[in-house]
Image (tube, rainbow, N blue to C red):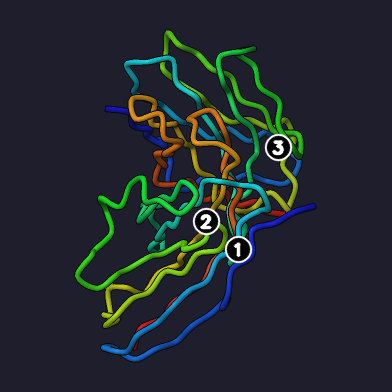
């Protein structure tokens, strides 16, 4: 069964360093999402792509976060510089269509700890 | 605006007893509703979804949910809890006005299953 791949699974970094997360969606899925999940809270959408274009990045802290999906397939989320408050689970999801009734398929996530 | 409220942050049941996880939604439209489950250090997995077809929706692992428009509820149930059901459960509504596939997550309910 096809799955969303993410790497690394765990990342520990020091404050002010740069970190990057990678996501490979299910083959053929045009829509890709990056979420942040702080322990004990729900999911916050950071950025949404349709193919290589950004559909929604209204909640992305653009002073330190960036995301790209250059060829409309895999995607990278970067944080520079990392802050203590960025410690969280970063989840990637994909969907076959840009439509509200389609479920999203989630990867295993990257657990980031900033020290 | 669309929103979901999960009425319990933590539910504890004994193995073999029924499970009830409560969710109320707010929407000016006919919503698409989902329940996702997240096991420790894992990504989210879709349990079931409602998209304006039958109001009683059956999902995986014996879970089901009933859409009640008059009560604006979408509670998740299971007749008999299993130890493997211990996880975090999220009630989710689609952001219909944007129709971009954006999902709005509840804060989550932690299900504890005691032997």
Residue holding disc 1: A24
Residue holding disc 3: B17
- Viewer can see residue B65: yes
- Give SS at disc 3: loop
Q: Disc 1 sits on a residue from what chain?
A: A
x, y percentage for residue A89? 46, 67
Q: Nearer the viewer, residue B13 or A81?
A: A81
What is the CA distance from the residue labelled 2 to the residue labelled 1? 10 Å
Residue holding disc 2: A72
Do the numbered discs 1 and 3 sit on residues whose CB atoms are within 8 Å?
A: no
Query: Is the same chain shared between marks 2 and 3?
Result: no
Q: Residue furthest right?
A: A1
Q: Residue furthest left?
A: A63
Query: Is the same chain shared between marks 2 and 1?
Result: yes
Please tell me which of labels 2 and 1 falls first in the chain.
Answer: 1
x, y percentage for residue B26? 34, 23
Quadrant of the image containing the C terminus of chain B: bottom right
Task: Classify 10 Å Cα crowding around label 1: few (below 14), some (14-19), many (20 and above).
Answer: many
Q: Disc 3 sits on a residue from what chain?
A: B
- Viewer can see residue A42: no
Quadrant of the image containing the N terminus of chain B: top left
Q: Against A104, is A111 above or below?
A: below
Q: Residue at x 44, y 31 (%)?
A: B94
Given this view, does label 2 or label 1 mark the residue nearer the observer? Answer: 2
What is the CA distance from the residue labelled 1 to the residue labelled 3? 39 Å
Given this view, does label 1 or label 3 mark the residue nearer the observer? Answer: 1
x, y percentage for residue A97? 55, 36
């Amino acid at each position: 069964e096809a799955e969303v791949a993410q790497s690394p699974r765990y990342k520990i970094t020091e404050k002010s360093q740069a970190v990057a997360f990678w996501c490979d969606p299910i083959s053929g899925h045009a829509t890709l999402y990056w979420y942040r999940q702080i322990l004990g809270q729900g999911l916050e959408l950071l950025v949404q792509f349709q193919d290589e274009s950004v559909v929604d990045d209204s909640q992305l802290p653009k002073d330190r976060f960036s995301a790209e999906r250059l060829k409309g397939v895999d995607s990278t989320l970067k944080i520079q510089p990392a802050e203590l408050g960025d410690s969280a689970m970063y989840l990637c999801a994909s969907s076959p269509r840009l439509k509200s009734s389609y479920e999203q398929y989630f990867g295993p996530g990257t657990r980031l700890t900033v020290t | 605006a669309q929103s979901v409220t999960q009425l319990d942050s933590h539910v504890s049941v004994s193995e073999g007893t029924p499970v009830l996880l409560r969710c109320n939604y707010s929407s000016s439209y006919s919503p698409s509703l989902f329940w996702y489950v997240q096991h420790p250090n894992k990504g989210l997995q879709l349990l079931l979804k409602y998209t304006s077809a039958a109001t009683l929706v059956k999902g995986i692992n014996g879970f089901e949910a009933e859409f009640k428009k008059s009560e604006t509820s979408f509670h998740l149930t299971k007749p008999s809890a299993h130890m493997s059901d211990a996880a975090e459960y999220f009630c989710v509504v689609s952001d219909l006005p944007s129709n971009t596939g954006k999902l709005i997550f509840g804060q989550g309910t932690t299900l504890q299953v005691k032997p």
